[in-house]
Amino acid sequence: MQIRPATLDDAEALRDIYNPYVETTTVTFDLRPRSLEEQRAWLRAHLGVYPVVVADDGDAITGFASLSPWRDRPAYRTSVEDSVYVRRDRHGQGLGSQLLGEIVRLGDEHGFHNILARIVGGHEASIAIHTKHGFEVVGTEREVGRKFNRWLDVVVMQRLL
């Protein structure tokens, strides 16, 4: 398994991983699947200081992780938010942890001060992986999202670099 920087050519593979989460889970608060052009635009926005890495087994992209701006005001520029998605048929193989480890390393290399994770309440696997990589729970935002006719909490985790 190779963890490598994403390219624009990976857009369709990332969509194939991400969109099922949009359509059937609460792990993302997006409500509609991304089009190929939207995924390409997202990747273009991440080709600079905000990295995206993919897990590539030689035959297919099996997961990805990214860093995104935490907030848009200038004083927040040294804080980023991570995202990690793994193809469902590859869960339980350690890919999420490998991807998170690499994106944390890149966050440090890029000079960020801290990484925040916003995890839907009850997503214990994601909380466990983040804890393994030195993140700590710093709070819970109550009922800040609504999807599938349910109010959703967000657990905020943080790791200082």
Image (tube, grey):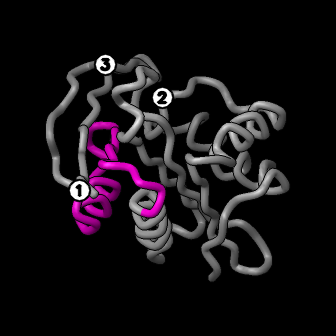
**Along the line of sight, the residue nearer the viewer: 43 or 64:** 43
Q: x and y percent of residue 106 in the render?
A: 48, 62
**Along the line of sight, the residue nearer the viewer: 69 or 56:** 69
The secondary element bearing badge 1 is classed as: loop
Q: Amino acid at mark 3?
A: Val
Q: x and y percent of residue 38 in the render?
A: 76, 31
Q: x and y percent of residue 58 in the render?
A: 77, 80
- Residue placed at 60% from the left, 66% from the top? 89
Q: Is residue 42 left or right of residue 144?
A: right
Q: Is residue 115 magenta?
A: yes
**Along the line of sight, the residue nearer the viewer: 85 or 71:** 71
Magenta span covers which residues?
A: 109-134
Q: Are marks 3 and 2 in contact (CB under 8 Å)?
A: no
Number of residues whose C-alpha sits closer than 10 Å to that of mark 3, classed few (under 14), some (14–19) or many (20 or more) = few
Q: Amino acid at mark 2?
A: Phe
> Which numbered tag is attached to residue 144?
3
> Which numbered tag is attached to residue 29?
2
> Which numbered tag is attached to residue 135?
1
Number of residues whose C-alpha sits closer than 10 Å to that of mark 2, classed few (under 14), some (14–19) or many (20 or more) = some
Number of residues whose C-alpha sits closer than 10 Å to that of mark 1, classed few (under 14), some (14–19) or many (20 or more) = many
Q: Is residue 7 magenta?
A: no
The secondary element bearing badge 2 is classed as: loop
- Residue placed at 17% from the left, 52% from the top? 136
